[in-house]
Image (cartoon, rainbow, N blue to C red):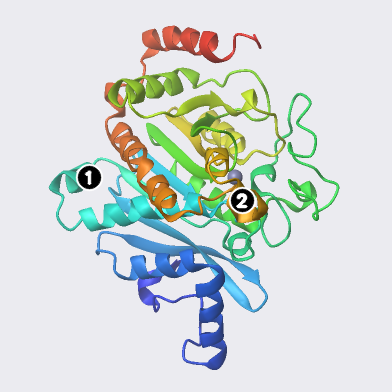
Amino acid sequence: MTELRDLTPHTVISHEQSRRGRRQRRQLRTFLPEMVTLERTLAEAPVAVTSSVVDRVALGDLKLPIYRVDIGTGKPEAPAVLLVGGVHGLERIGTQVVMAWLGALLKRLAWDEQLTALLEKVHLTVLPILNPGGMYLNQRSNPGGVDLMRNAPITAQDRSAFLLGGQRLSRRLPWYTGDPGQGMEVENRALEAVIRELLPGRPFSVALDCHSGFGWQDQIWFPYAYRRRPMRRIAAVMALKLIWEQTYPNHDYRFEPQSRHYLTHGDLWDYFYKQINRDNAGVFLPLTLEMGSWRWIRKRPRQLFRLDGLFNPLVPHRHKRVLRTHLTWIDFLLNAAASHRNWLPDAEQESMLREAAISHWYRDTI
Ligand SMILES: [Zn+2]
């Protein structure tokens, strides 16, 4: 890992002054403006913020960095929040939501004593653009044509959705899982390295991976995607849902196991959930925010004719609204992680909440 502070803020380009460097910079501004914004934000970030490059993705003569940002306590026994954006390159709004929240957090660090106190109790790690090559190319998959959300070594137990559930036929078709014999792609290995270093040993951790493109409503999905039966930590998801809905009754997220929509092969978060929860006593909840982009299309059907319009709000006022809508939810996750002792169920509450979760989500499957 390279410490960002040792380098110029524009780490993508090694020959910043050269003609090639200037050309690459121009390309980046055109095709990956999110990266330019992120590098500017990090260059101006307060000293409490650490940035590093976890790995780089080759694309032509570019080597696009996967940035990692860390803030908060260094205590290994503290709870942690992991925020991820840009797994699917076409869903730029996911990255933009993560960066809008991160930008606000960094500004608040200059004046907000309560936030400083909160960050003494919780650790935050952010990977705003996991798939920079895919985002540069404005495509869902990584530059090798692999759908990163179908690329983990885990197979659906029941019939997965045709193609959409992950396919091995061709990298030219969507939802390509990659070649299982080759291991995970560089982007996923980078994420795995962060997770293995960050999460083990913590009493509670939560991940939020921000996507768009499915449904009419904003949804919070949790494992599993590979089978229909509930996961072991389902009581903790129910508890989190309850405190969220009691605290913010005017927000409107729909919490559901991904398996209610479709089963997939190779789901990244199923894989990490199983790895971390199997080997550790603490609870790790990986959540996915699926922003319901069909609403944006319904209000503006012309958007259907632009591929990025299927996944991103194109009208400026709607774009701003999406960026501010999720700030409360991400703040909530940081606060809930820091105060997990006050809501995470104990053994007695666990069985009650598990029953509630099963009758709420799994009535048809058990
Ligand atoms: Zn997605």
Q: Amino acid at mark 1?
A: Glu
Side of 32 where 339 appears, left or right: left
Mark 1 and ligand 1: say if the CB distance to the nearest ligand atom is below 8 Å: no
Determine whether 223 is above or below 61 in the image: above
What residue appears at the point 45 percent right and 23 percent down from the top-left corner? 237
What residue appears at the point 36 percent right and 37 percent down from the top-left corner? 329
**31 or 134: nearer the eye?**
31
Determine whether 62 is above or below 210 in the image: below
Provide the residue designation for mark 2: 302
Q: Amino acid at mark 2?
A: Arg
In primary-sequence order, the first of circles 1 and 2 is: 1
**14 or 261: nearer the eye?**
261
Inspect this view and state whether residue 1 appears. no
Provide the residue designation for mark 1: 120
Inspect this view and state whether residue 298 appears. yes
Q: Quadrant of ligand 1?
A: top right
Q: Secondary structure beneath disc 1?
A: loop
Q: Badge 1, how many Cα within 10 Å: few under 14, some, many 20+?
A: some
**111 or 298: nearer the eye?**
298
In this view, the residue farthest toward the bottom is 18
Q: Position of residue 275 (x, y in %)?
A: 57, 35
